[in-house]
Amino acid sequence: METTTLRVPGLVLVEREFRVPLDHQRPDGDQITVFAREVAAPDGLDRPYLVFLNGGPGQEAPRPTSAPSSPAWLRRALEDYRVLLLDQRGTGRSTPVGTLDGWEPAQQAAYLRHFRADSIVADAEWIRTALGVERWSVLGQSFGGFCVLRYLSAAPEGLREAFVTGGVPPVGRHPDEVYQRTWRIIEERNERYYRRYPRDRDRVRALVERLEAGRVRLPNGEAVTARRFRQIGNALGASDGAEHLHYLLERDPDSPAFAHDLAGMLPFSSRNPLFVLVHEAGYADGHATRWSAHRTRPRSFEEDPTLLTGEHLFPWMLTDYPELAPLAEAAELLAEHPWPRLYDERALRGCEVPCAAAIYAEDPYVERGFSEETAAMIPTMRTWLTNEYEHNGLRADGGVILDRLVQLARGAR
């Protein structure tokens, strides 16, 4: 374990790199690095730990600042805790995934099967043991909430408290059930968007024609397909997403500014391929996914080119995103893989860890009904169902949301 301590205005940062097994079932096998950054107030170096499990998969932990406090929930967290920001395996300063050049597709797929929530939680337990911590608290946002439920299923003895925002996953459900519901939600979000900005429907229709003719390119010269462009609908799940989308569409599509802003809004960039490769596996609680979102897409999205897609993945992305092409065959193998169970319903029903979750009533990414169903399994889980926030609530108003969850878990009404 390598350690570096830094002091910046208002914060003490302790940076650590841990060597952990790639496969925790084979602790003497290949190892990778997992990076964690401890963040504390100068007078809070002995406070209990709160481990932040980020959304994703494939996204690194936020990089902290003190003025203004970033992430938005950090100031509130440091009142009670020192925070451990975990760069989940394959992200940030942890061992990167890349395109696994020179590997056979079967080797790539075998490697990538170790980047789900089960492996991330095993890393967290490895780190907890290495630090000599008896128990700690966890905060999971979106996919990080899936990791929290895995933690409650597999290693609840390591937890003092568990908080979830926009990420209580379905348990035992088939991925097809999940995507059938999220398709309905994102279709409604499209109609809501076009009611707010009615002229944008014609703008999207005209843009799709230009895209199909190969007339829209990113600043790097890469042509954008119409189906890839339609993925900007992923923004409609955030509190400010509709406005960002509208401000993109009001630009002249021939302008450099449009190309620049479009590149920034395309949701599944090459920064890390893990989201495309193992996102659906996060819903595979004992199933193969077989490109579930693609198979369950409603006919309306085929017939109406102005309907924008959400957090839905498709096999054609492995060609439309040139940087993903080296992993195309591995992605097909992962889609056919019969994933083991992530969650233990018996353990959840017997949970003794104080838990609290913010469930966003209109969340297009993590469907409310299944979240409520799962929360009802956990006797210690207290939920806050709200339409005050979208999926990005923790980023938008993190101090308020975290404070509410802490109070709920500790018995406040």
Image (cartoon, rainbow, N blue to C red):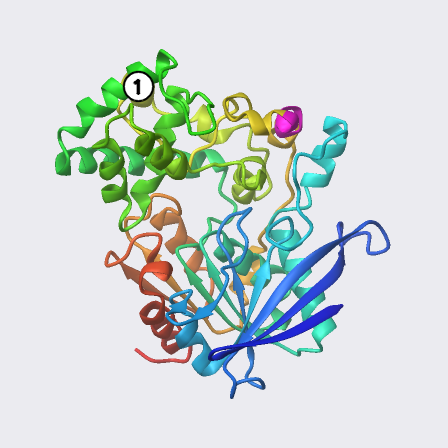
Q: Is residue 191 visible?
A: yes
**In the rendering, at what x and y percent does residue 252 appear?**
24, 27
Residue, x 50% and y 81% (percent of image)?
A: 41
**In the rendering, at what x and y percent does residue 108 appear?**
72, 33
Crowd around label 1: few <14 · some 14–19 · many ≥20 (10 Å): many
Residue, x 36% and y 11% (percent of image)?
A: 213
Residue 135, located in which quarter of the rendered image?
A: bottom right
In magenta segment, residue 98 = no
Residue, x 24% and y 34% (percent of image)?
A: 190
- Horizontal relation, residue 114 to residue 350: left or right: right
- Horizontal relation, residue 384 to residue 243: left or right: right
Considering every residue shown, the one lying at the far front of the view is: 256
Q: Nearer the viewer, residue 277 or 202?
A: 202
Considering every residue shown, the one lying at the far top of the view is: 213
Residue 208, located in which quarter of the rendered image?
A: top left
Residue 88, located in which quarter of the rendered image?
A: bottom right
- Horizontal relation, residue 146 to residue 28: left or right: left
**In the rendering, at what x and y percent does residue 379 appear?**
46, 68
- Horizontal relation, residue 309 to residue 283: left or right: left
In the rendered image, the vertical position of residue 39 relative to residue 295, given as above or below: below
The prevailing secondary structure element of the residues shown in magenta is helix
Q: Which residue is mark 1?
A: 208
For badge 1, the amino acid type reads: Val
Q: Quadrant of the N terminus?
A: bottom right
Give the magenta part as a residue range. 326-331
Q: Is residue 181 visible?
A: no
